Amino acid sequence: MNAAPGVEARAGDERVFEVSAIAFDLDGTLLDTVHDLAAAVNAMLADRGLAPLSTDAIRVMIGKGISVLVRRALATAMNVAADDIADGDLGAALSCYQAHYAALLGRATLPFPGMREGLERLTAMGFPLAVVTNKATRFVRPHLEQAGIARFFAVIVGGDQLPTMKPDPGQLRHVAERFGIPCSRLLMVGDSGNDVDAARAAGCPVVVLPYGYNEGRPVQILGADGIVASLAAVADRVVCFIPETP
């Protein structure tokens, strides 16, 4: 089914997106990584003689990269404002956190329901897939490899690979350029306001999952083009758009 960019077919009351490729967020979308993140945060806090934080408390700190996560965790544990954390203290804590996270990576990570089924279905449908995440690049591929899903992704973009990261549109524009398609033909699948804002700025359609890490905000208020129950359900909402040859 071919149509002009931006035109979508409809199945019942749900939009079906005519796209040529699909980009996925990582943490909170493909993989439930919060337990690894929490363990690394608490190991970093313990090294500083600070009390641990609950996993639920850390969950709402995730989404804007590890620097923001570590700053928020330090501020909460020290009962100060995030802006009160000195850059020197943050840098030392960040290095400590990264060392712990590298050692713990993947030990407690879990796949979200329907993740592998969804990737297999989308690949069989002919979609090239990408990962677009604010996670530090050095940790992205190891996570995907440990989960056994790295083979699905033709393009992987980490949070420090380009000059900007989500909610800036630069990462999605980069993926669209790599795939040789307009942003209007790249579907973003995520779980947070960062994903929606980046997609909106890039001109990509975007759907979100009802679970994941969204800094405590309900996904219903994000203004995405749709909410899908699981990654397996993404395949029911897309048609592979193949441009007509001259």
Image (cartoon, grey):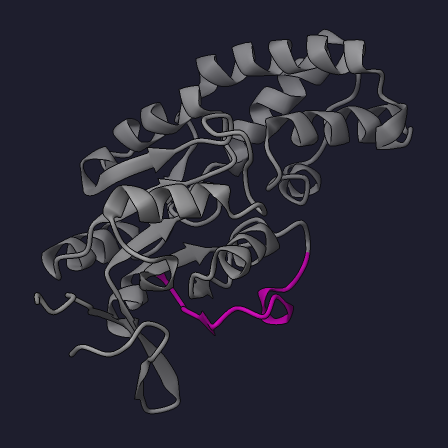
- 227 magenta-colored: yes
Q: Tell me: residue 107, above or below residue 234.
A: above
Residue positioned 34% across, 55% down in the render:
113
Residue positioned 37% across, 62% down in the render:
230
Q: Position of residue 219 (x, y in %)?
A: 58, 65
Image quarter hosting the N terminus: bottom left
Please tell me in which quadrant of the rendered image residue 72 appears: top right
Asked if residue 41 lies left or right of residue 81, the reply is: left
Asked if residue 227 lies left or right of residue 49, the reply is: left
- 118 magenta-colored: no
Q: Tell me: residue 15, above or below residue 149.
A: below
Magenta range is 217-230
Q: Position of residue 240 (x, y in %)?
A: 18, 67
Q: Tell me: residue 137, above or below residue 168.
A: above
Question: Which of these two is toward me, 124 or 108?
Answer: 124
Q: Position of residue 238 (x, y in %)?
A: 26, 70
Residue positioned 58% across, 50% down in the render:
194
Farthest residue in the front direction?
246
Farthest residue in the bottom direction?
12
Residue positioned 39% across, 28% down in the render:
140
